[in-house]
Amino acid sequence: MKKIIVGQSGGPTAVINSSVAGVYKKAKELGVETVYGMVYGIEGFLNENIIDLDEYLSTDENLELLKRTPSAFLGSCRYKLPKIEDAKDVYEKIFKILDKYEIDALFYIGGNDSMDTIKMLSDYAKSNNKKQVFIGIPKTIDNDLPITDHCPGYGSSAKYIATSLKEIIRDNASFGVKKPTVCIVEIMGRHAGWLTAAAELSKDDTCEGVDAIYLPEIPFDINKFIKNVEKLSKEKKSVVIAVSEGIADKDGKFICEYGSSDKKLDAFGHKQLSGCAKTLADLVAEKTGLKTRAIEFSTLQRAATHLASLTDINEAFNCGARGVEAANEGKTGMMVIMERKQTRKYEIEYNLYDIHSIANVEKKVPREWICTKHNKLKDPYLKYVKPLIEGELIPIYKNGLPVHLIRK
Ligand code: F6P
């Protein structure tokens, strides 16, 4: 391979840039001349918004800075490629640009929707005898990609969520009032509850943990929820509850839509889910007269590179590097997956898997890991998640603030 290109797609994570660093570093080790970056994903690529990454990443200092930089350094997009038979011109344009820049391999760092791009491009290349190869690098805080044990981005968000909940629980418990404040915290993750499940990590030697966790895997019953809050508020001086942005009633109506039904759709047809904590906090206040507070972690939970997990940073880097090795071996239409070895010490093996089994598929939290009686997660979940949040990479500070690498 002489020239390659890498792009970032979908919602950013705290470690998505580590995968770019992994792609760049491994490519240079293998003697690749030019590593291009597509600015704003495949959407930017279609406008030839392309940069040479040597400009930013040729020093070890900048590679280290990139690992400590939140969001998508290259810029991201939510763009769905049309069906090949409906829009041959789009594919012809993409391959014309690939040929113009003499690109041998394209790497796309993204979640299940973004992996659709790798599927479409590798399918088109195959049926049109194109020489370029296409490899997916996993990424999503939602942790809902199938086949892989977990996804880069998840461990860091889980660490942020658990840490922030520990702090919120301390704050909420400060006042020795007779009636507790009910604090409801909304966590991202759409239709899969992996991120909200991480609220279970807030319980440790120095924290009592959250009082209840509600995942989208289980239909949400508002009356049962209010009864549970009433019960908890009689027993406790502080009540903190974690809810997924994607909780929905038994008919599939999102709880956030009870507050405002006008939810916008993104390019993949997903509703923008936001506001269920506020809806529930208002309802609890109305029904019980208790003081309530709603907190939405929103983008903070995916941008908190200052609290990223070192395990996650390293794995994101390794996924990028493994992707480049795979392309160099001539593989295409595949995504890098992480397989957990059955060893006592946590260890990961990096392998490749057919993109057709991955694109557009969502992996949910196993039902047997969820305790609906106490609204908690069971031990197998804790065993699964704990290694993923281990370790820290201290930010580089200047004038008391973390320094980031940014595009000019
Ligand atoms: O895809 C990751 C994700 O963070 C989801 O958990 C969330 O629903 C969505 O992105 C939010 O996307 P946006 O910030 O584009 O509204």
Image (tube, grey):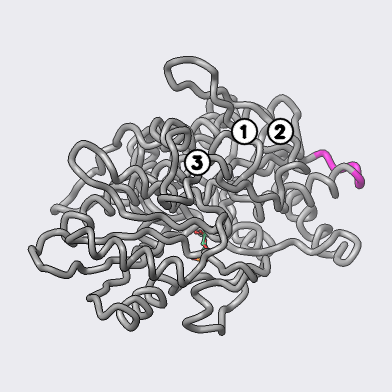
State which tag comes first along the sequence, 2 or 3: 3
Q: Look at label 1 and name its amino acid.
A: Ile
Point out residue 102 in the picture as x, y percentages from the top left corner: 72, 44
Mark 2 residue type: Tyr
In the image, taking residue 203 as reference, residue 103 lies left or right, namely: right
Question: Can residue 315 be seen from the camera position used here?
Answer: yes
Q: Which amino acid does the dot numbered 3 rest on?
A: Pro
For label 3, the SS is: loop
Disc 2/disc 3 C-alpha distance (Å)? 16 Å
Residue 297, horizontal then vertical, whole percent: 36, 62
Q: CA distance from mark 1 to mark 2?
A: 7 Å
Count numbered badges in the picture. 3
Queried on whether the Cβ of the residue with tag 3 lies below 8 angstroms from ligand 1, the answer reads no
Of the pair 390 and 230, the residue shown nearer to us: 230
Question: Does dot 2 land on a helix, a strand or a loop?
Answer: strand
Q: Residue furthest left?
A: 176
- Identify the disc placed on residue 353: 2
**Observer-nearest of 384 and 37:** 384
Residue segment shown in magenta? 127-131
Q: Which residue is more in the foreground, 124 or 276? A: 276
Residue at image location 26% in from the left, 68% down from the top = 182
For label 3, count other residues whose C-alpha is less than 10 Å away and answer few (under 14), some (14-19) or many (20+). many
The residue located at (55%, 45%) in the rendering is: 365
- In the displayed structure image, the side of residue 192 where residue 226 appears, left or right: left
Relative to 361, 17 lies left or right? left
The residue under the point 51% across, 30% down is 318
Q: Is residue 226 above or below residue 55?
A: below
Displayed quadrant of residue 311: top left
Q: Secondary structure at mark 1?
A: strand
As measured in the structure, the alpha-carbon distance from the residue carrying label 1 to the one carrying label 3 is: 10 Å
Disc 1, disc 2: CB below 8 Å? yes
Q: Position of residue 111 (x, y in %)?
A: 60, 50
